[in-house]
Image (cartoon, coloured by chain):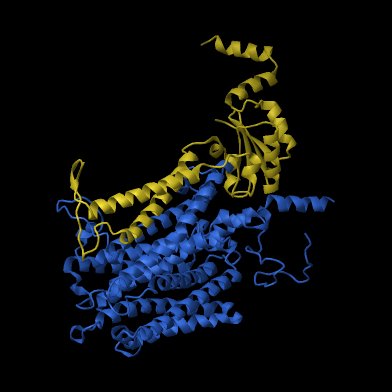
């Protein structure tokens, strides 16, 4: 094989097609990779910023707990939900959080099957983010049922009433889809962590740590015979999770699409929801990765190239979402259905027009800035854009849920939804839950997939290294 | 016992020291570990160990070294086939669950009487196949994934509470940056000194004796 000579240094941002950009910078030894990734976990104290973030998050989580308690003892009247807007904030928040939860498994499963090696640096905390986002997502339908002590009615459990759930209802599909997604994501995340937990066990400085990490490491000893089955299991999980991740938001979209309401009853919903979920999920990964790599000193592993690649995916999925918005409008007009046409004109120019235009500017216009290389390489601008994308995606769910419910067929049954302070603070509190779990994870868990990162280093290839040695000897 | 101490002393005096050490360690040694510092090192070593006829050996590495399983002659795992049957179970379970709870009114005895229900909704057929697909899909994936992880652990004999390789404080860097080849004493070809000499010829960083 002939190789073209390369006359300039290859850095992580190089677009030279003759040489792949390095995935790990400034490290050519496996030991220093372990030490540098775990530096903040093994330090006596985390950075001050961690404490500040933790105190704020924990306080918000307490707010969430208090408000859920208030809801349970008082009833769903504390929310702004009314007739006709039966689905208010709880369902908007549920769809928002499930959407966020899509990036992790997408990165771990789909990018894995496509052999995108750059995923190794970001998959672990993206998966963690997925788990915690699905925890937040699962909370909202659970409390939306109102009498939460009857939440077990969601499941097909034999009971004294001889009643079963209705399997033709998308709401029940949702129970199975989200439940399966949570379980499979958790397994994927945990299985990926076993070798890294073993690393932390073997490096533990105290008995307590050694026992705690050792418990979760299951006695992993890096045996190649184990790795063989482990790699097959990982591949199988990726292959199983790939259709799963596409199905979950499709099923969530059926909650809307199977209903008869104008603005909901459309066939574009499943792909449109999936694209939106990946879009919001990647935005959230970026919003978390940018401060995390700064504080945890992980710039050699989550390089500017990783950030740039993620920006490109945000641009791609953002454009798909923008296309879906346009297509919805076109079909509403083209169908000649007066209710459908009205629903869309009402979204853009009706009483919730402000929400619609926040959504369009954040989701359609903002990510288009990523066409420019200078913006894809400016950390601060990226961070701000991703925050806007998160905001926009929440408003998308608000627009879809609330506008269609508030103004459906008969003007006599139209209504107006207004959130109460409990609605708003419960949503804010769910960020507290999410961030508390995430901060605990990055403090005590392996934030990056250490063994996978080592495996994508050029030093890890037994043949390349061997050939290199022979060349040196000749 | 007063007699035992002189006896041991006479034995020690009678037999050469080397033999004594060899006999004792033969009984106590679980295996020999050779530590390498590069993936290429262990790859070449594993190939040679396999070619020399050893079967009870293993490589302990911080990450899956590409091609090492083939070099060691590891048999391809049966896991995918098991997972297929796990998925099939999920599919059948979902079909049963949905037809039983929504389409038929029969009584099955599961500790108590459990009765199915004919759920008639807006004139839809009792067995509404399209509506039953999402849950069938989800349960197929769920059971496949659970089977996959549990059987991966089961076939690997994990969780493992105790293992000689984990016991040795000298091999703590397996999960960090060292590559360790272990030949177990139960291998028919294992002989304490010959195996050690053989491992020495593979140019490891060091050789560690493992206690059971």
Q: Position of residue A3 (x, y in %)?
A: 77, 63
Q: Could you tell me which residue is drawn at 29 percent across and 88 percent down? A: A351
Given residues B58 and B162, the one toward you in this image is B58
Q: Is residue A422 left or right of residue A374?
A: left
Q: Is residue A156 left or right of residue A304?
A: left
Q: Position of residue B38 (x, y in %)?
A: 68, 48
Q: Could you tell me which residue is drawn at 33 percent across and 72 percent down? A: A257
Quadrant location of residue A137?
bottom left
* Residue that protrudes farthest toward the top in the picture: B3
Quadrant location of residue A335?
bottom left
Q: Is residue B118 left or right of residue B23?
A: left
Residue B128 to residue B88: above or below = below
Image mark count: 0
Given residues A446 and B146, the one toward you in this image is B146
* Residue that protrudes farthest toward the right in the picture: A474
Q: Position of residue A362 (x, y in %)?
A: 44, 82
Quadrant position of the C terminus of chain B in the picture: top right
Q: Position of residue B65 (x, y in %)?
A: 63, 48
Q: Is residue A57 visible?
A: no
Q: Give the chain letter for blue.
A: A
Q: Is residue A325 visible?
A: yes
Given residues A37 and B76, the one toward you in this image is B76
* Residue that protrudes farthest toward the bottom in the picture: A349
> Which hue belongs to chain B?
yellow
Q: Is residue B8 left or right of residue A318?
A: right
Residue A231 to residue A113: above or below = above
Residue A460 to residue A342: above or below = above
Q: Could you tell me which residue is drawn at 69 percent across and 50 percent down? A: A462
């Amino acid at each position: 094989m002939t190789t073209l000579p390369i006359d300039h240094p290859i850095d992580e941002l190089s677009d030279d097609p003759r040489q792949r950009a390095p995935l790990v910078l400034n490290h050519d030894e496996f030991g220093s990779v372990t030490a540098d990734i775990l530096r903040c976990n093994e330090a006596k104290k985390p950075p001050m910023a961690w404490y500040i973030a933790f105190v704020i998050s924990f306080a918000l989580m307490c707010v969430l707990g208090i408000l859920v308690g208030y809801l349970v003892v008082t009833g769903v009247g504390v929310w702004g939900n009314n007739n006709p807007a039966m689905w208010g904030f709880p369902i908007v928040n549920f769809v928002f959080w499930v959407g966020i939860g899509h990036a992790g498994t997408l990165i771990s499963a789909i990018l894995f099957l496509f052999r995108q090696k750059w995923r190794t640096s970001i998959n672990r905390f993206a998966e963690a983010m997925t788990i915690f986002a699905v925890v937040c997502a699962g909370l909202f339908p659970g409390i939306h049922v109102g009498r939460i002590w009857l939440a077990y009615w969601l499941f097909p459990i034999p009971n004294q009433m001889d009643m079963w759930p209705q399997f033709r209802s998308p709401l029940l599909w949702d129970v199975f889809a989200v439940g399966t997604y949570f379980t499979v994501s958790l397994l994927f995340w945990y299985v990926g962590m076993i070798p890294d937990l073993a690393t932390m066990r073997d490096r533990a400085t105290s008995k307590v740590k050694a026992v705690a990490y050792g418990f979760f490491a299951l006695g992993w000893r890096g045996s190649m015979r184990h790795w063989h089955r482990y790699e097959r299991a990982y591949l199988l999980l990726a292959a199983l999770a790939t259709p799963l991740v596409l199905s979950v938001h499709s099923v969530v979209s059926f909650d809307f699409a199977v209903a008869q309401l104008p603005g909901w009853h459309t066939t574009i919903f499943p792909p449109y929801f999936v694209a939106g979920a990946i879009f919001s999920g990647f935005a959230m990964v970026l919003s978390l990765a940018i401060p995390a790599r700064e504080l945890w000193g992980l710039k050699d592993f989550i390089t500017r190239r990783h950030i740039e690649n993620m920006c490109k995916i945000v641009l791609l999925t953002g454009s798909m979402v923008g296309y879906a918005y346009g297509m919805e409008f076109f079909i509403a007009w083209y169908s000649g259905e007066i209710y459908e046409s009205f629903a869309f004109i009402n979204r853009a120019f009706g009483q919730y027009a402000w929400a619609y235009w926040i959504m369009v500017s954040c989701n359609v216009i903002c990510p288009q800035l990523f066409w420019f290389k200078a913006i894809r390489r400016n950390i601060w601008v990226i961070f701000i854009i991703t925050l806007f994308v998160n905001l926009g995606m929440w408003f998308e769910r608000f627009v879809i849920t609330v506008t269609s419910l508030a103004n459906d067929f008969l003007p006599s049954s139209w209504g107006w939804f207004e959130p109460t302070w409990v609605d708003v603070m419960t949503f804010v509190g769910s960020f507290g839950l999410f961030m508390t779990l995430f901060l605990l994870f990055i403090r005590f868990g392996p934030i990056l997939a250490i063994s996978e990162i080592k495996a994508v280093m050029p030093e890890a290839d037994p043949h390349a290294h061997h050939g290199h040695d022979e060349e040196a000897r000749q | 016992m007063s007699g035992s101490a002189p006896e041991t002393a006479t034995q020690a005096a009678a037999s050469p020291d080397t033999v004594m050490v060899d006999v004792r360690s033969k009984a106590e040694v679980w295996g020999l570990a050779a530590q390498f510092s590069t993936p290429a090192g262990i790859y070449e070593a594993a190939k040679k160990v396999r070619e020399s006829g050893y079967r009870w050996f293993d490589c302990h590495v911080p990450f899956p070294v590409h091609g090492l399983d083939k070099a060691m002659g590891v048999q391809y795992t049966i896991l995918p086939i098991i997972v297929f049957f796990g998925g099939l179970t999920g599919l059948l379970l979902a079909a049963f669950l949905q037809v039983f709870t929504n389409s038929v009114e029969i009584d099955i005895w599961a500790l108590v009487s459990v009765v199915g229900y004919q759920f008639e909704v807006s004139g839809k057929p009792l067995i509404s196949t399209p509506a039953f697909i999402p849950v069938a899909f989800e349960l197929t994936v769920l059971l496949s994934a659970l089977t996959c992880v549990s059987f991966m652990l089961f076939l690997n004999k994990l969780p493992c509470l105790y293992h000689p390789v984990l016991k040795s404080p000298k091999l703590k860097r397996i999960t960090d940056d060292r590559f360790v080849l272990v030949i177990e004493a139960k291998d028919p070809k294992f002989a304490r000194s010959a195996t050690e000499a053989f491992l020495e010829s593979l140019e490891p960083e060091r050789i560690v004796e493992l206690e059971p």
